[in-house]
């Protein structure tokens, strides 16, 4: 019996502290439609998050004109003069990822207010009647954890995944139509949690395995006994998720990018075109701990 308990404990510890090293390359190809005197590209960067991820290295093919922080996020701004042909900017990041699911509790220390993650905002209309009424149907008398599980199961089973849609529609429209892409799955999950007074937020980042398009949105929900934990309503697992989520931001509407996701640009002169491409991989010669 003692050996069984020790084996079980070792397995739990191995799962809880499993680490994975990943890489991604963001490529931005900028071209002018005529004569562009100046262009500026701003993109979001990953940061260290205790117990979630650690940024090992970031390498830029062009030196950023500025690296700055806004609303807790980090950004790089690149400035280009007189575009006469296509220019490519590459960002290579190597990151250590830890599992951040509900497989095991962990000790937490909260310093910041959770009010912002209980309130309605653009695309997360948690005060609208349709969302409030659906949230009440999913509320559990047992615990907030059970309520979160009910919300996850509802979104996962009832929303139809329609494939990538470049246009955001928000939780209210997604719930009315019962369909959407990963963004609508995350928005709807978060709105239903907030309507039940459970802090939740939408996360923007990259999936590094088993996905054709790395750009992805998922959710984080806060419970006192767990802290902030990852929930992905597009996935068939709630309790355990692989540590292949690179988090960039948990701000749904990025002011530094003028409300756009991942990157934005500005120019003076003729318009520019920006094509972005992201590739991800498992870093070589890594050790699992």
Image: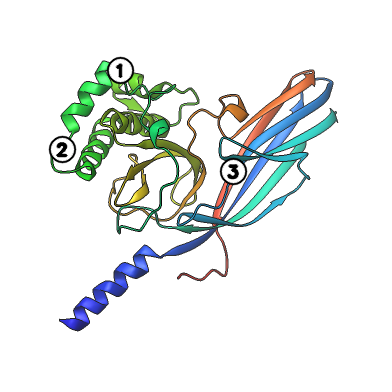
Give the SS element for disc 1. Answer: loop
Give the SS element for disc 3. Answer: strand
Real-space CA distance between mark 2 and mark 3, rounded to the nearest whole angstrom: 40 Å
Which is closer to the viewer, label 3 or label 1? 1
Mark 3 neighbour density, 10 Å: few (under 14) some (14–19) many (20 or more): some
Residue at which label 3 appears: 278
Q: Are marks 2 and 3 in contact (CB under 8 Å)?
A: no
Residue at which label 2 appears: 140
Please name the residue shown 36% across and 58% down the image.
107
Q: Are marks 3 and 1 in contact (CB under 8 Å)?
A: no
Would residue 85 be visible to someone looking at this image? Answer: no
Mark 2 neighbour density, 10 Å: few (under 14) some (14–19) many (20 or more): some
Q: Quadrant for the N terminus, please.
A: bottom left
The x, y position of residue 234, in whole percent, is: 34, 40
Q: Residue furthest left?
A: 141
Q: Quadrant for the C terminus, please.
A: bottom left
Mark 1 neighbour density, 10 Å: few (under 14) some (14–19) many (20 or more): some
Real-space CA distance between mark 2 and mark 1, rounded to the nearest whole angstrom: 20 Å
Q: Earlier in the sequence, mark 3 or mark 1?
A: 1
Residue at which label 1 appears: 128
Which is closer to the viewer, label 2 or label 3? 2
Please name the residue shown 45% across and 31% down the image.
164
Left or right: 148 with respect to 216?
Answer: left
The x, y position of residue 98, in whole percent, is: 44, 58
Give 223 or 156, whichever is nearer the viewer: 223
Please name the residue shown 35% across and 65% down the image.
15
């Amino acid at each position: 019996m003692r050996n069984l308990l020790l084996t079980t404990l070792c397995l739990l510890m191995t799962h809880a502290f499993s680490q994975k090293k990943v890489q991604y390359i963001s490529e931005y190809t900028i071209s002018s439609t005529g004569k562009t005197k100046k262009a500026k590209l701003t993109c979001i960067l990953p940061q260290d998050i205790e117990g979630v991820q650690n940024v090992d290295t970031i390498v830029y093919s062009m030196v950023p004109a500025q690296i700055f922080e806004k609303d807790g996020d980090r950004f790089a701004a690149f400035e280009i003069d007189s575009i006469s042909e296509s220019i490519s900017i590459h960002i290579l990041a190597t990151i250590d990822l830890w599992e951040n699911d509900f497989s095991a509790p962990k000790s937490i220390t909260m310093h910041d207010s959770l009010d912002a993650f209980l309130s309605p905002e653009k695309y997360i209309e948690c005060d609208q009647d349709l969302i409030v009424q659906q949230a009440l149907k999913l509320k559990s008398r047992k615990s907030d954890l059970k309520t979160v599980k009910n919300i996850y199961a509802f979104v996962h089973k009832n929303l139809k995944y329609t494939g990538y849609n470049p246009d955001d529609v928000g939780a209210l429209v997604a719930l009315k139509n019962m369909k959407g892409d990963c963004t609508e799955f995350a928005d709807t999950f978060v709105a239903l949690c907030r309507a039940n007074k459970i802090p939740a937020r939408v996360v923007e980042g990259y999936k590094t395995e088993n996905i054709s398009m790395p750009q992805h949105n998922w959710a984080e929900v806060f419970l006192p006994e767990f802290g902030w934990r990852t929930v992905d309503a597009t996935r068939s697992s709630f309790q355990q998720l692989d540590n292949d989520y690179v988090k960039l931001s948990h701000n749904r509407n990025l002011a530094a990018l003028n409300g756009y996701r991942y990157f934005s640009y500005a120019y003076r002169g003729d318009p520019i075109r920006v094509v972005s491409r992201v590739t991800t991989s498992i870093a070589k010669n890594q050790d699992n701990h």
